[in-house]
Image (cartoon, rainbow, N blue to C red):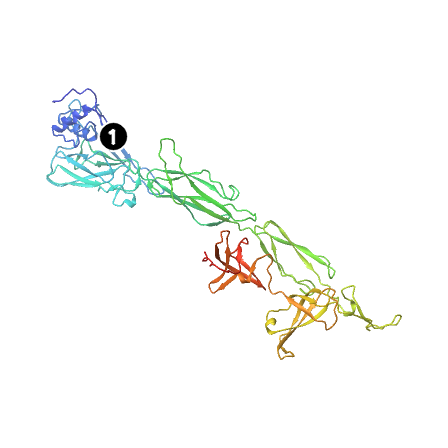
Amino acid sequence: MAGDFSFYRELSVGSVGPDVKQLETILNDNGYSISSVDSLFTEQTRSALARWQFDRGYSGSANESDETVTVSLSSNSAAYSVGRANTAAFVVTPSVPSGTGSTFRGAPATKPTLTVSASSNSVIEGDPVTFTVTSDISLLTDLTVALTIGGSAAGGDDIANDDDYEEILTNIVLPAGELTVSVTSVVFVDSVIEDEEDITFAIAQQFGDDTSYLSGAVKSVRVVIAANGSDLKPLLTVKASGEAIDEGSSVTFTVRTSVKSNRDIRFNVTLSGNAESDIDYLTPDSDVYTINAGNESVDIDIQIRRDDAVELDEDLIFTITGDVPPVGKNKRYYLGSNVKSTVVIQSGDLPELTLIGGSAIAEGRSGSFRIVSDAPVTEDTSVNYQVSGTATNGQDFRVLSGTVIMKAGSSSVTVLIDTINDDVVFLPSDMLVAQWPARIGKVEVDEGEFVLQGNVVLSLTEPEFTITMKVSPTDRAELVVGQGVSVDLKVGGQILPGVITELGDSATVGPGGEEQYEGTVSVTGAFDAVDGATVSIDVTLAEALQVLAVPVASVLRSADGDQVRVVNDQGTITRLNVTIGLIDGEWVEIKEGLLGDELIIVDIVSGSAAEAP
């Protein structure tokens, strides 16, 4: 054969080099078709070489004797029984003539020998791949060829079902008069992280003596689908099966990935919150979990423990933590929008209450009973109790409401029972009451005189001096009972405090025909006065102490508000808006608008004031 150099080594599938390219060029130029002439020795190269060697009577690389394959059925008593025909035997003969030139023991020459090839050894998602079945002779009738389609990639028609390429049927028809027939399948484009996968296309093995075709040297090809999805980032999120869970139950946390992968996704989690590990829940064996290849989620169950403790509800927090890959490695996963889920563990345990107390209580004395809990309550708790017996609630003892609050953190509460001494009756003659020392107004008996029970012995003068006042309807509208007053006795210069004790609601007519209202003022203190004396009464209706005040004449009043005029050190006059309060004679209270260090103008002889700021 013509070539550039002599072959110098043994070549087989996987060999790479210029000698491979020279071999493929020679084979292709001599009619042994190779779809892609390059420096890689492939199954297609071996198929073309086998046809070339067969046509020239070459033997295989090693002399082999016939080999046998025996297949037999195994028993399965739960599913079937084995019949009499339960074995089959096959003889494996060399596919090329022996080195001695012995007659080839294959199918009769009238049967076609079939080989297969692929348009490419590797493809990426979105690419088509064409598989071709080639016969060494043309036939007068159509030939149905059985195929075996396999490999790690899945064929089908729906990406949602994790199919990787368009389904290839397991039968193909070689039309009469044709030497080849092809089938094309497109590799699907999906959003899945996938390692390298492959499709195998092979002529199915025929059994028995009456076969319709023979398998050539290349009866199977493999096409690799390149790894893909490295640009996709799986975002993990978590959601709990419920927001609250009872003790003794279990909670499921579902971790979901945004991107499916044909690799396992291992991720890290932490459990936190005020729920205690191995006390309130069973601690998982590991804090690393896996979303298995091909799955989009995994369920993680946490068992909640039951106890008899009275306690507050507790939080169990499930958190997905970030991946920290080794130097130079990519992250296995990324954190999504919700990587934390909180479940409230509800305690269904209630405290048991008992009541301690009971004894004899004398009327007018106090007793108590105590309500005791077997465990401190977790929050303020209303405790109800009933009161019964012959004693009447509210008559024989002070009213008991029937409810008491046990404070959070405490385990007992005490309730007092105050009895009432209902046998005590007060008579006016039991006690002589006055503001001592008091004046004796009149003694009804003489010294040494025998006094019968119930007779008056003496009388006391009124300790408080009473004043009757008369006011106009206008003043009456400003007065109320209980109002404090100042009473000024003109004679003697005494001013004592007093209180309005009575106010009439009906007017009377005075000497001049005017309406008058009467009232009574009670005065405290020693009041040197006699009946009929005239006094003046001052009533304070409103009072403001320690306030800022200016002369009434300095305030300019208008519908738009009140203003005062101030002058600065340069003689500039400015109007300031103010809020006034109480007015007392010539002075008015300033609530807002002045600081107290301004110079106020009462009147202007000449000149004019500036506008308000």
Residue 231 locus on image (x, y percent): 31, 38
Residue 92 locus on image (x, y percent): 22, 30
Please identify the quadrant where the N terminus is shown. Answer: top left
Q: Is residue 87 left or right of residue 335?
A: left
Please give the residue where the numbered disc 1 appears in the rendered image.
68
Q: Quadrant of residue 139?
A: top left
At x 48%, y 40%, the residue is 283
Q: Is residue 226 visible?
A: yes
How many neighbours does mark 1 have within 10 angstroms: few (below 14), some (14-19), or many (20 or more)? few
Q: Is residue 207 visible?
A: no
At x 75%, y 71%, the residue is 530
Viewer-proximal residue among 394 and 220: 394
573 w.r.t. 153: above or below:
below
Residue 47 locus on image (x, y percent): 18, 30
Residue 171 locus on image (x, y percent): 20, 41
Viewer-proximal residue among 344 and 36: 344
Amino acid under label 1? Thr
Viewer-proximal residue among 540 and 347: 540
Q: Is residue 130 left or right of residue 411?
A: left
Q: Quadrant of residue 432?
A: bottom right
Q: Farthest right residue?
A: 448
Q: Farthest front residue?
A: 606
192 w.r.t. 394: above or below:
above
Q: Tag count in the figure?
A: 1
- Circle 1: element type: strand
